[in-house]
Structure formats: C-alpha cells, structure tokens
Image (cartoon, rainbow, N blue to C red):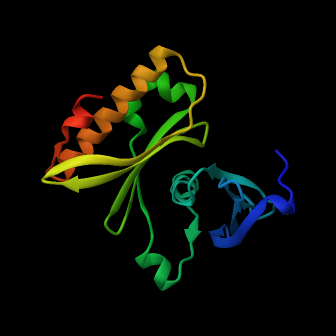
C-alpha cells in the first residue's frame, strides 16, 4: 500500500517504542496507521497497527507492543477514548474471516465499531433513553457478505449490545430486540 503526501490528513507523535518515536498517520479517507521502529537497531519505520479509528489503533498498539509508551498532554487524557474489545462475541468463524468488534466510550458518548480486516464496516452510537439502551446514527458500509455471515454478524452485534446494556444496568430497547 502506497500512501502519498496528498493522501495524508495529519501526522502526530503518539508515543515511544523502545525509545523511538511512534507516529500516527491519518489519511484524508480516515484510515489510521501507527508507524515506528520495532527494534532499537532498526532504522526503517514500519506499520505497527492500522485501523479506521485512532483509538482502536492505539488500543491495538498497546496490546501488541507491551513496551509502547503513549504520550498525551493533559487535554488529550481528559478527552481520551476508552476502547473495549468485544471481538470474542463474534465467535471463531467471524474472527477468522477478519472481523473485530469494539466499544468506544468518550465522556458521555458510547459507540460501537465493527471492522473487517481493520476497515470499519459498521458503526452506531448508543443512547440511554428511559432506562433503555437504543441505537442512533447506524452506519453500514455495505459490501458483499453471505446471508449466513450477515445473520451471524447481526446476532453478534445484538449480543454485544445486550452485554453493554447489562453493564450499564439498562434494558435493550424494543427496536434492538427485534433485530
């Protein structure tokens, strides 16, 4: 994959790995790539983590490289997004196909992101209304999936929503139950 200067929206230093800078590159299309040098002897940067959301990239970077040290200023810590990986809900078949599921929480906002090979294929915001969890702004980047795959994904997302609702002591809204 070649990324040209005209494709880059932003580059920022997000931490250090083995004493060397790790940079997050965001493309104009919204794809994020963490670049850095894995070993202390290395002189060439390589992709360390990729994804459709910078918080997911940072989460996976910390998971893959235990020695990664993020750098954040005070305002970034206050506004940082907490990422919870919920991929286990998808089951082995969907995971082996390359799907991942994440819950992202920032202040009072909660959303979920379904990715396929690190590219977001569905996202939705979660709202609390009358002691129920409901969905707003559901977005799906439709691609060719089998009916069986689509059904399994729908059931997994419903299960993840149920788990999230329980963790917040809420019930699922009727519209989610009908999914």
**In the rendering, at what x and y percent does residue 87 appear?**
43, 38
Front residue of 88 and 65: 88
In which quadrant is the N terminus drawn? Answer: top right
**In the rendering, at what x and y percent does residue 64 appear?**
57, 51
Number of disc labels: 0
Q: Is residue 73 visible?
A: yes
105 vs 2: above or below: below
**In the rendering, at what x and y percent does residue 39 appear?**
74, 59
Q: Is residue 33 left or right of residue 74?
A: right
Front residue of 15 and 111: 111
Residue drawn at point x = 26 percent, y = 36 percent: 176
In which quadrant is the C terminus drawn? Answer: top left
Residue drawn at point x = 44 percent, y = 64 percent: 81
Q: Is residue 3 left or right of residue 87?
A: right
139 vs 24: above or below: above
Q: Is residue 44 visible?
A: no
Residue drawn at point x = 54 percent, y = 26 percent: 96
**In the rendering, at what x and y percent does residue 47 appear?**
73, 53
173 vs 82: above or below: above
Residue drawn at point x = 64 percent, y = 50 percent: 50
**Which picture quadrant has residue 161?**
top left
């Amino acid at each position: 994959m070649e990324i040209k200067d005209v494709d880059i929206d932003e580059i920022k230093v997000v931490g250090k790995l083995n004493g060397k800078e790790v940079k997050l590159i965001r493309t104009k299309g919204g794809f994020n790539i963490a670049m850095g040098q894995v070993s202390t002897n290395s002189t060439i940067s390589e992709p360390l983590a990729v994804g459709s959301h910078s918080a997911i990239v940072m989460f996976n970077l910390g998971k893959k490289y235990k020695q990664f040290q993020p750098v954040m200023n005070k305002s970034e810590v206050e506004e940082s997004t907490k990422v919870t990986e919920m991929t286990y809900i998808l089951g082995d078949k969907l995971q082996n196909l390359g799907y991942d599921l994440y819950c992202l929480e920032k202040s009072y906002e909660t959303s979920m992101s379904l990715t396929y090979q690190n590219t977001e294929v569905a996202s939705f915001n979660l709202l609390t209304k009358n002691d129920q969890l409901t969905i707003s702004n559901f977005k799906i980047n439709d691609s060719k999936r089998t009916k069986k795959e689509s059904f399994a994904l729908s059931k997994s997302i419903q299960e993840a929503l149920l788990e999230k609702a329980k963790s917040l002591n809420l019930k699922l809204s009727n519209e989610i139950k009908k999914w």
